[in-house]
Amino acid sequence: MNLKIAVLAGDGIGPEIMEQGVAVCSAVAAKFGHEVSYREALCGAHAIDEVGDPFPDETFRVCSEADAVLFASVGDPKYDNDPTAKVRPEQGLLAMRKKLGLYANIRPVETFDCLIHKSPLKDDVVRGADFVCIRELTGGMYFGKKVEPVLNADGVEEASDTNYYTRPEVERILRVGYRYAMARRRHLTVIDKANVLASSRLWRKVAQEIEKEYPDVTTDYMYVDNAAMRMIQDPGFFDVMVTENTFGDILTDEGSVITGSMGLLPSASTGTGTPVFEPIHGSWPQGKGLNIANPLAQILSVAMMYEYFGLKKEGALIREAVNASLDANVRTPEIQAVTCDGTQRRYGTKEVGAWIVDYIGKA
Ligand code: IPM
Ligand code: MN
């Protein structure tokens, strides 16, 4: 297969983990005889500094012309505490999602047996948790009408975001949820706040209609506050969950830590344009340049990319190599197991990536 890949490394630890993701991507391509080519493009704070736009037109063109986008992370502390900034790195990510029509964000939450002790949850609660969150990605409060902080007629400062959804937007994401549920354990949980929000009542109404088309799937409905609780009490309950943009953002951060490290979870954003594969974690500016960032989420995003194109063996080999690296304790510092005599080697971003590339080469 020929694959043209746009590479958007972005900010913070992005470039370091991307280097390993690309190396693994190339190693797998070489192994299975695929042709991959890469084109790098600017995004995030980095792009603001260079050209004044977090998602420049040129980057959009590179993404549109590619078969897939590998994305790392965007964000920079200099914007985090400046609510008046006219342009923000995160807008680059949102523009990319919107312009490429990436309405479905697939976030699998899987546990690795050897890392369960790192979970803040008790072993027996988290063991075996394995679910997928399907997060709507181009609607809701993220994209609804906004009023930035402004003085109103009474001289009081006000601001608002509109949680706007249309029926077709809800319907298409629910269908993605059902597709995943059909391919898994046939259990779909629709997460909303229909007891309070009108937008959620639209979700529930549409879901109750569509549910009838999927009699093989058990559908249940859960309020988001309850779902947040259930996720830490009994994560094994979930198979596929589908929810709106904001709820999905929050729940997937929660989901990622119950597995032990945020640095392990990949995601795929798909829809009408070029699909994007990216870790769910952020740009971790404090870790930048220190060779300590975990590259596994980026590497597993490459696995999701191969699988998206139907290349199952390629994806499986990456997963096998990642598991082998964990078993061999070739891990970045935040998950490294301490041996009794404390003499184990330290591995950084580069060493973990190189070990995985080597494993793939020898497989
Ligand atoms: C994510 C991130 C983004 C989001 C930010 C960086 C805009 O948190 O992908 O989950 O809120 O969607
Ligand atoms: Mn998030």
Image (spheres, grey):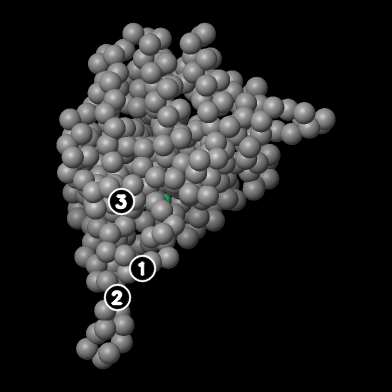
- The furthest residue to the right: 341
Could you say which disc has been placed on residue 49 in the image? Answer: 3
Specify the amino acid type for callout 2: Pro
Residue 240 horizontal side relative to residue 177, left or right: right
Disc nearer the start of the sequence (3/2) = 3
Query: Which residue is found at the position 65% from the left and 22% from the top?
Result: 328
Query: Which residue is found at the position 77% from the left and 28% from the top?
Result: 343
Query: Which residue is found at the position 36% from the left and 56% from the top?
Result: 246
Q: Does 42 sit above or below residue 309? A: below
**Figure quadrant of residue 105:** top left
Discs 3/1, front: 3
Specify the amino acid type for callout 1: Pro
Disc 1 target residue:
83
Query: Where residue 280 appears, x then y in whole percent?
Result: 43, 43
The N terminus sits in image quarter = top left
Query: Where residue 225 appears, x then y in whole percent?
Result: 47, 60
Discs 2/1, front: 1
Callout 1: helix, strand or loop? loop
| Alpha carbon separation for disc pair 3 and 2 | 25 Å
Q: Does 108 sit above or below residue 56? A: above
Could you say which disc has been placed on residue 149 in the image? Answer: 2
Query: Where residue 202 appears, x then y in whole percent?
Result: 26, 58
